[in-house]
Image (cartoon, rainbow, N blue to C red):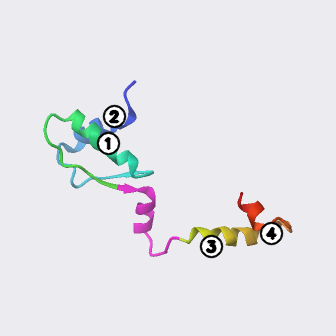
């Protein structure tokens, strides 16, 4: 079975040639971009200008002027909404885990 990123590398090279400098590839995390570089190199017998890589989070942040919420603050807000909605007496420690 052919790895998915091999298929992606082949498709990118077929569509855009070896100059991928004007292409941006969006991944769920940064780790996948390291592997795609390897697959691009393996699929081409000549040097390839790599595409730009972004995570989905980076893409969303670039499309808005809103800031990303602090994770601790967001959990505390969620806990307050949970308590109000359910009238629960559960502690924050119990809720979080």
Q: Quadrant of residue 43?
A: top left
| Residue 60: in magenta span | yes
Q: Is residue 14 above or below residue 90?
A: above
Query: Neighbour class for label 2 at 10 Å: few (<14), some, many (≥20)?
Result: some
- Viewer-nearest of labels 4 and 3? 3
Q: CA distance from mark 4 to mark 1?
A: 45 Å
Side of 70 relative to 30 (left or right):
right
Give me the disc on residue 83: 4
Q: Is residue 2 above or below residue 65?
A: above
Mark 4 lies on a secondary structure that is helix
Quarter of the image that includes the N terminus: top left
Task: Return the residue found at the far left.
Answer: 46
- Viewer-nearest of labels 3 and 2? 3
Region of the chain picked out in magenta, as a range: 54-68
Residue found at x 75% / y 72%: 80
Residue found at x 68% / y 72%: 77
Mark 2 lies on a secondary structure that is helix
Residue found at x 80% / y 69%: 83
Which residue is the site of mark 3?
73
Which residue is the site of mark 2?
7
Which residue is the site of mark 1?
36
């Amino acid at each position: 079975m052919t790895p998915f990123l091999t298929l992606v590398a082949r498709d990118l090279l077929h569509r855009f040639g070896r100059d991928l400098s004007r292409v941006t590839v969006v991944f769920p995390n940064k780790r996948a971009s390291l592997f795609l570089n390897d697959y691009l190199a393996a699929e081409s017998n000549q040097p390839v200008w790599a595409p730009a890589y972004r995570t989905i989070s980076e893409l969303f942040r670039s499309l808005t002027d809103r800031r990303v919420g602090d994770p601790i603050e967001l959990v505390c807000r969620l806990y307050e909404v949970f308590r109000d909605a359910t009238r629960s007496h559960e502690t924050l420690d119990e809720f979080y885990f």
